[in-house]
Image (cartoon, rainbow, N blue to C red):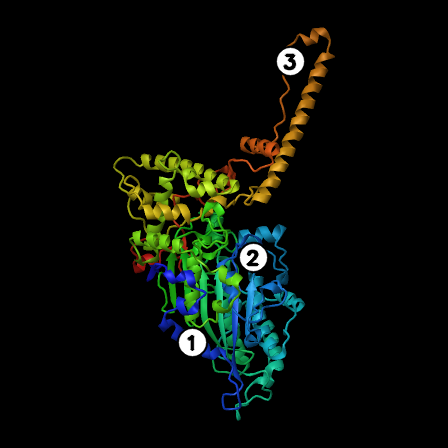
Amino acid sequence: MSVKLCLPADEKFSIAFDQNKFFSDDNLKIIRNKEKREKPKIGCGPDGCKTNLFFGFFFDGTRNNYILAEREKTHSNVARLYDCYPGLSVPGVLPVTSDWENDKSNYTHFFKAYIPGVGTEFKQVNDSGDGFDETAGAAAGYKGEERILWALLQAINNVHRYFMKTPLLSDKDIKSIILKIDLNKQARSKIVPPEWYERSMPNEKQAKKTRIEFEIILRELHAAVSQHWPDKKTGKPKKVDPGIVQKIYISIFGFSRGATQARAFTNWLMSLCRLDAHLCGKESGSMTLGGFEVAFDFLGLFDTVASIGAGNTLGNSFLGKIFDGHGSWADAEDSLRIPTNITCLHLVSAHELRRSFPLDSVSVKGVVTPNCMEIVFPGVHSDLGGGYAPREQGRGVDPNGDDMLTRIPLLTMYRAARLAGVPLKLELASAVVQQRFKVAPSTITDFNAYLAACTTKTGTLTAIMREQAQYQMQWRLARRAGSKMPLEATASFSRASTFDQNDLHSANCEFEQEIAAFKKWLSEKGKGFKPATQEPGFDNDHKDEWEEIARWWNNVPQLAPAMMRFFDEYVHDSRAWFKLIPGNADNEPQLVEDLKAWEAKRKAFEQFNARRSKEVAEQRHWLPPEARVMPSTPYKPVEDGLSPHQRNAAIEYARTGKLPRMITEGREPYEASKNTYYMWARAGYLRFRKIYSGWDSVLISQNETTASQEESVS
């Protein structure tokens, strides 16, 4: 499989808002040529009044939400790209303050749709973003299918909006339609009616239902816009105003589960366009929408994580082998495959290690098609896709986040999209939007210094990921408790909030326990043990991963200073704050509420025990004298159910009113136990990321890949 580690960042990344300086002369020629199709033809000549439409779809990641991001400046890279796409937004999704303002009259044929991440409010699909919707959305991708369907219906609405200035389908219509349609691979396989010679298969009725519903909507669209179709003889439509549409150009972006949605959406929209072409009598394989030709320009993905359903949380348990995160609409074999007729760029996190965040590569059995490129970037999941606040976990010092690692993959995606023809207009965006693309020159310098110290820069995805994972483990070992410079002594830790310090320190303590377990396992192997390079197909068996680590464990090379600085200052710890086990706060406001509740509980039990102890003593006082000389059983206080850490933290918070230093819990467990019902995958820091390659059963996991190994199953 041909992938690569990212290239050094161009020093021009610091001036991306200046188009003439950011792009080379050759790149500008490509962009100028692409921009010709964006401008309607004016006049009465043969090309007069001809125009094209441009649709942009932006699927945000889990718990990423544009509106929520405004306060803490936690915008994802998908939200940032949305901001510099001109044109008309979908009313009601975002505040009008986020609408495109520069030369609005020049972009009436541009349409863009922002789709908030699962686990956050999206009232257009009846997602409250609270209670069960929030929990199930974050844990299992709940309401993801509804988001895809909403976006498909907005594509239909866009055509109608251009000609009629109003949507074909109202919010109420869309909510009703969502209840009728299933977006699974069986339904997509039947989206275009079969030829007369094709046999019907059993249980096709339900699968055909989706096609029938879409047919009804498309025929309604055709009835409204057919007056704008060109006459077969004259080439002119009955109605010219507002323009003679030649082609619709579509681009899609997504991050995390939003990238999963973007991949499924792309496949479904292409199928929908083939159905539209079929209804218009076009030749097989053609794609139209509302009767107008469609072209797919670009699919930009930040670190695809499916985890639809139980994800990779249940490990190698019986249920874990059934529910692997590719449930419902997110099957790896069909819905997440990248079509060959769209340019795709997939930016992959080198240092994400949570069990619950396995990667879905754009490769199929280790092979990347020519239209796709997969690039590995240093950093964890949200270092690539965005979502961290400036200075979170002490990473960076700039209040606007100019020194955040996430800006570099953002600008890499922006540049690639522009060259592919996506009409992003950062140079015309507001000053606020341009600010969100800025990157400090020092960040570029440190980023490039890290890359210069890396060895494996091309080859298989696994070769690159293995090396990057080892670098991260080496850094963590150098920052373990008792080392010359433990994590708690670093500058970034000292800058972190108390909440973040608690998580970082607690996770570092757990790392010591994980190391002890690893060393015990290694010692039990005996002195003659010679660890071997592991076979392909890492699933959730930590012992295979540990044997891979054991190959270098007793001779851990020292990381270059540039690498140590890079991890200290830029790479977040995604495991430290990620509370998988319910009842453990993953944000400061919730922890404050917990502390108040713990203190109230502690006081209530303290008062109860004091009262009962007094009552028992008084009861003894009234006993006959001969009974009082008998030995008495002391009152046993009723336990409050709090751990010592919780109790001490509650007392300290009640005393000071400030968040105390404390031990936090609830992270992905590094060992299976009765507390996890022996079902959850062993997690921790001594592990490698699980990577799917186009099939539920095909995993990429070793340096040298052979044909037989690529087909190995977990």
Question: Eyeballing the image, is 389 above or below 259?
Answer: above
**Label 1 sits on what residue type?**
Arg
The reply to whether discs 1 and 2 touch (Cβ–Cβ < 8 Å) is: no
545 vs 322, left or right, is left
At label 2, the amino acid type is Asn
The label shown at residue 32 is 1
Instruction: Say if 290 sits above or below 86 in the image.
Output: below
Disc 2 or disc 3, which is closer to the eye?
2
On screen, residue 509 above or below 181: above
Eye-nearest disc, 1 or 3: 1
Query: Are the two marked residues, 2 and 3, in contact with CB atoms closer than 8 angstroms?
Result: no
Q: Which residue is mark 2?
A: 65
Dividing the picture into quadrants, the one containing residue 15 is bottom left
Tell me which label, 2 or 3, sits earlier in the chain. Answer: 2
Q: Earlier in the sequence, mark 1 or mark 2?
A: 1
Determine if residue 479 is in view. yes
Question: How packed is label 2: few (under 14 Cα within 10 Å), some, or many (20 or more)?
Answer: many
Task: Judge whether residue 59 can be spotted in this image.
Answer: no
Element class at badge 1? helix
N-term mark: 1 or 3: 1
Residue density around tag 3, few if under 14, some if 14–19, many if 20 or more, within 10 Å: few
| Image x and y of residue 384, in percent | 44, 56
**Residue indicated by mark 3:** 632
Badge 1 crowding class, 10 Å Cα cut-off, few under 14, some 14 to 19, many 20 or more, is few
Residue toward you, 219 or 503: 503
Q: Secondary structure at mark 2?
A: loop
Determine the residue positioned at 56% across, 83% down: 243
The answer to whether 652 appears left or right of 424 in the picture is: right
Element carrying mark 3: loop
Snapshot quadrant of residue 710:
bottom left
Residue ID at (47%, 45%): 393
